[in-house]
Amino acid sequence: QVQLVESGGGLVQPGGSLRLSCAASGFTFSTYVMRWYRQAPGKERELVAHISSAGSSTNYADSVKGRFTISRDNAKNTVYLQMTTLKPEDTAVYLCNARRFTTVRVDDYWGQGTQVTVSS
């Protein structure tokens, strides 16, 4: 059974930091590109960051570049999102995604999300 379980969200003041985790099980984690998305009320889902299967390549949305860092530990089947200098506009549900392309299909898994609220 495939599972992606996010944790680490919460309420934080502007300028603060949070570290999100996404624990994966039920599939070969090390072969999947991992992504963090976020969705704020009334807005479209936004890709925040992604990391290659081996962790050697990362990419970020312009809105979080320099403030967020994505990383992964393939031995622990976990991907992380370190968020610093948080702003009210970072408030959203943050979702973890695992995706792998093969020659015949796309394997695509999602977690349930963790709420991040940035407010004073």
Image (tube, helix red, strand yellow):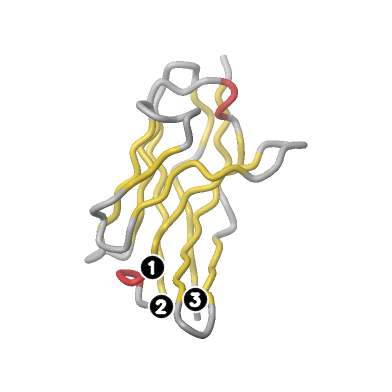
Residue type at mark 3? Answer: Val
3 and 2 marks in contact (CB < 8 Å)? yes
Q: Quadrant of the C terminus?
A: top right
- Residue at the (50%, 55%) spot, across then down: 96
Quadrant hosting residue 65: top left
Compare residues 86 and 60 and report the one nearer the observer.
60
Q: Which residue is mark 2?
A: 27
Compare residues 62 and 15 and report the one nearer the observer.
62
User: Distance from label 1 to label 2 (Cα)?
Assistant: 9 Å
Q: Nearer the N terminus, badge 1 or badge 3?
A: 3
Under tag 1, what secondary structure? Answer: loop
The dot on residue 77 is none
Q: Count how many numbered circles sit on residues in the image.
A: 3
Toward the bottom, the furthest residue is 104
Question: Residue 51 at x, y = what percent?
Answer: 35, 52
User: Distance from label 1 to label 3 (Cα)?
Assistant: 13 Å
Does residue 50 sit above or below 25 in this rendering?
above
Under tag 3, what secondary structure? Answer: loop
Does residue 10 sit above or below 32 in this rendering?
above
1 and 2 marks in contact (CB < 8 Å)? yes
Label 1 Cα neighbours within 10 Å, binned few <14 / some 14-19 / many ≥20: many
Q: Nearer the N terminus, badge 1 or badge 2?
A: 2
Under tag 2, what secondary structure? Answer: loop
Question: Residue 43 at x, y = what percent?
Answer: 72, 37
Q: Which residue is mark 3?
A: 2
Q: Nearer the N terminus, badge 3 or badge 2?
A: 3
Label 3 Cα neighbours within 10 Å, binned few <14 / some 14-19 / many ≥20: few
The dot on residue 32 is 1
